[in-house]
Amino acid sequence: MDLTRPMLLLLGGEGAGLRREIVERADEAVTIPMAPPVESLNVSTAAAVLAFEAFRQRRTRTERLHHA
């Protein structure tokens, strides 16, 4: 998923997630792949993973633009 553009990330709780009405209005959905035996992440961990990936993608994009 391209996380370099401006966006709003909506995160739901581990058990219930987001309300169906919110999910239906979203442009895209993202999942975080996990290796067994991990079944889920708490919301703060998921937010940290997504924030780091957005930072990584944006840094890589900026480096490519400066070296082009």
Image: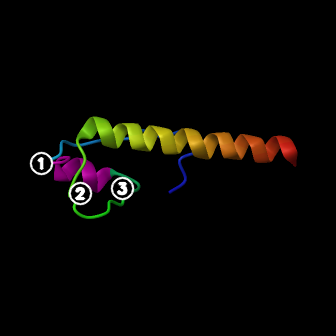
Q: CA distance from mark 2 to mark 3?
A: 11 Å
Q: In the image, which is nearer the foreground, mark 2 or mark 3? A: 2
Circle 2 residues within 10 Å: few <14, some 14–19, many ≥20: few
Which mark is on residue 32? 3
Q: In this rendered view, identify the residue nearer to me: 4 or 51.
A: 51
- Judging depth in this view, the residue of 35 and 29 nearest the camera is 35
Q: Secondary structure at mark 3?
A: loop
State whether residue 3 is above or below residue 1: above
Q: Earlier in the sequence, mark 1 or mark 3?
A: 1
**Which label belongs to residue 38?**
2
Q: Position of residue 62 (x, y in %)?
A: 73, 40
Outermost residue on the front side: it is 37
Q: Residue at x 17, y 46 (%)?
A: 14
* Sequence-first tag of 2 and 1: 1
**Type of the residue with mark 1:** Gly
Q: Amino acid at mark 3?
A: Ile
> Of callouts 2 and 3, which one flags the residue occurring earlier in the amino acid sequence?
3
Total residue callouts: 3
